[in-house]
Each structure stands twice: as structure tokens, then as C-alpha cells.
Amino acid sequence: MKNLLLMRAPLKYIQGADALKHFYENIKDFGDNFLFICSNSAYKSTHDLIEESFKDSKTKRIYKVFGGISSTGEIEKMRKIVRDEKIDVVVGVGGGSAIDTSKATAYYEHKRIAIIPTVCATDAPCTGLSVIYNDDHSFNTYLFYPNNPDFVLVDSNVIANAPTKFLVAGMGDALGTYFEARACYKTSSLSLENGGISLSAMALCELCYKTLIKCGKEALISCENHLVTPELDAIIEANTYLSGVGADNGGLCVSHSFYNGVTSLGKKTAMHGACVAYGTLVQLVLENGCKEEFNKVRDFMHSVGLPLTLEEVGITKEDVHQVAVASCVPGESIHNLSGDVSVKELEQAILLVDALDHDYLNNK
Ligand SMILES: [Zn+2]
């Protein structure tokens, strides 16, 4: 579909304080039997509010607390519940793993899918794909769906009471969105959903970046104090909708390849979004663009506590070669960059960002 523009998004998106109280009224046409696949903390923070939205309804609700990753084994378990209990609607409640498991379960069983993110750490809620793992936690595949989720609902009160590290990581994931899409657009690369990149997608991505710069710091302070402010709501929307729909329709580039390279080390590192943010600085160095842009992105990252050095990412200088090799394997999104990039060039860019940032921090 290289020449055809493509825009995909969730069918319906609702966000705000106390949004959960309106969950059922928004999906009552989907069916009567619901399976909620929840992370442990998500179950605690949302169960009572979800139940309140169902009061007086004649529906069946089954809650499964899900402790694992989005693996083939977990998905099989959930599919069996859907069949045995004649479920009409699968609802993913939690972070990336619960959401990805729910999306896959609904897709295989041909059921409607609703998503209630309880953290804003990744693009998972709004995208039309899942990351699937093997039961031993190793990466299995990306599972692409014909459509994005039917319904996404974010309750800002829940996000304001979630640990701030998730909001920060989500801002890191969202930070890559505009720059990765811009790089893809320049080379007429395909979006994450294999379509041509539209002006609409670029507008969402650009707004995502501008919103981070404008509201990121205040949103973080709001979250630290459990306050739902206009700035926090703006960042919830940027992290969840603008970044998710933006990346889906805008495409990925160096930032996400850098993250995939970091995961190849198999060790505990900073969260997905934090690595993506560092990878964005690497991309800006490789693009050799204007210094003001690099400085603006770095100032933002510093202001919200995103990692500026390799140490903060959780890797060493000795790891950089392996990260660069893994980031550049065929099929990686890094090859969407104009002029492409070699392992050696990437390795040097990763090290240069670390050196520049040490200098920056020393002069603070
Ligand atoms: Zn991401």
C-alpha cells in the first residue's frame, strides 16, 4: 500500500477524571458478557469503579488477575475462558502486558475489545498490534490486527495516583514519535501499519512533541502530588492517544531500534520509553540537524528525569557495540533513516550522546 495513505485509530477514545464511572454506558451495545484481564495493581485501582458503572445492568463480569507477560500460553488460557463463559467483550485493564494479552485474546476469538490503561507508559492502548512473547519471556513476534481497539478509556484520577515513573517513561516513548515519523516521512517509508504516511498523522505527531515540551514538567509535578490538572490531562492524551495513533500511522526509526538493541543484552535496563528517549537523541545526532533542536529535546528530558547517559539507560560503553549490531539487523526501523546508517556510525552516535550529555550535566 506504499502509495496509499492510511489512518487508523481506536473507534472511540474517552479520557478524564472519573471517566471509569461511564465505562459501561459507552460499550453496552457490545454485548452482555465481559472478561476483564487485569494486572494486580490495576484490579485494585479500578475494580470498584468499573463495577459502579455496571450497577443495575444485567451483565456477567469475570475478572482475571493476570500476573504474567503477553505470552502464547497466557493468551491460550484467556481464550479458553472466553469460549467457556461465552464472553462477548474482552477488556484489558493495566499496562502493556495485560493490554497486549487482551487484544490478542479478542482477536483470535473474534470478540470486541476495550482497553482501560491504568498507566501511561507505552503506546500499547491505541495501537493495532501486540508484542507477543514466548512463555520463557523471550520475544516471539509482533501480532498485527486488521483494526485498532474498539474502545479506549483512560481515567485521569487513576493515572494521577499511579507511580510517576510510568508517566515519565510514557513521555519518553512519546518523545520519539514526532522525530521517528518525520524521518520516515522524509524517505517515504511505510508506517507501522504498512501504509503511506498522511499529513494527518504528521500533525498528530508534531502536536505530541509540542504538548510534551509545553506541559511535561507541570504534568509530572501534578502526578507527584496526585492532582488532575489540565497539564496532566494534556500529557495523558499525548502519551496515550497522540503518541499511539501517531506512531501507528507515522512509523518508527532510530529511537525504537535503539531500544530493541538494548533489549538484546538481556539485562535489566531503564524502561522502554526511557530507552526510546535516549535513542531519540541518538537519532538527532545521526541526522546532524540543528543544534537548537537537540538542545531543546535534551533540556526537556533533563527537566522530567529521562536518562541522558548510558549509565542512566543501564548499559556500559562495552555494551554499545552489541546494542548497535542488534539495532541494525535487517528489518529494523532504523533503516527508515535517510541515507541509512552503519553499525559503526550508530556506535559512535550512541557514545557521542553520552559524552555530550556528561559535558552538559557537568556544566549545570
Ligand atoms: Zn514505544
Image: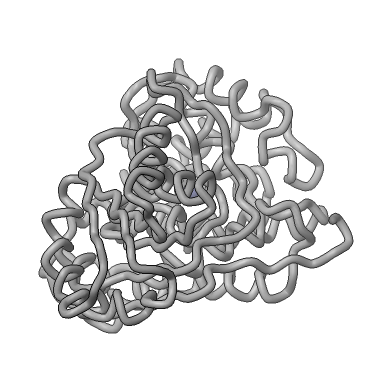
- Colour pattern: one colour
x then y, percent, for residue 31: 40, 68
273 sits left or right of 156 in the view:
right
Give how far across and how far down residue 250 sits, in percent: 66, 60
Q: Residue at x 27, y 80 (%)?
A: 22
Q: Nearer the viewer, residue 239 or 61?
A: 61
- Could you tell me residue 278's position as x and y percent? 46, 44
Can residue 278 be seen here? The reply is yes
In the figure, 180 relative to 327: above or below? below
**What's the residue at 34%, 77% (across, down)?**
15
Image: 155 above or below 311: below
In the rendered structure, the answer to whether residue 310 lies left or right of residue 290 reads: left
Q: Residue 346 location, x and y as percent?
A: 63, 31
Quadrant location of the N terminus in the rendered image: bottom right
Identified at 44% across, 69% down, the residue is: 151
Q: Nearer the viewer, residue 251 or 219?
A: 251
Nearer to the camera, 231 or 137: 137
Please give left or right for residue 164 compared with residue 81 in the image. Answer: left
Count of marks placed on residues: 0
Q: Nearer the viewer, residue 245 or 205?
A: 245
Using the rendered image of the protein, determine whether residue 167 is visible from the camera's viewpoint: no
Residue at image location 20% in from the left, 68% down from the top: 50
Q: Quadrant of residue 203?
A: bottom right
Farthest residue in the right direction? 3
Q: Residue 66 lies in what quarter of the image?
A: top left
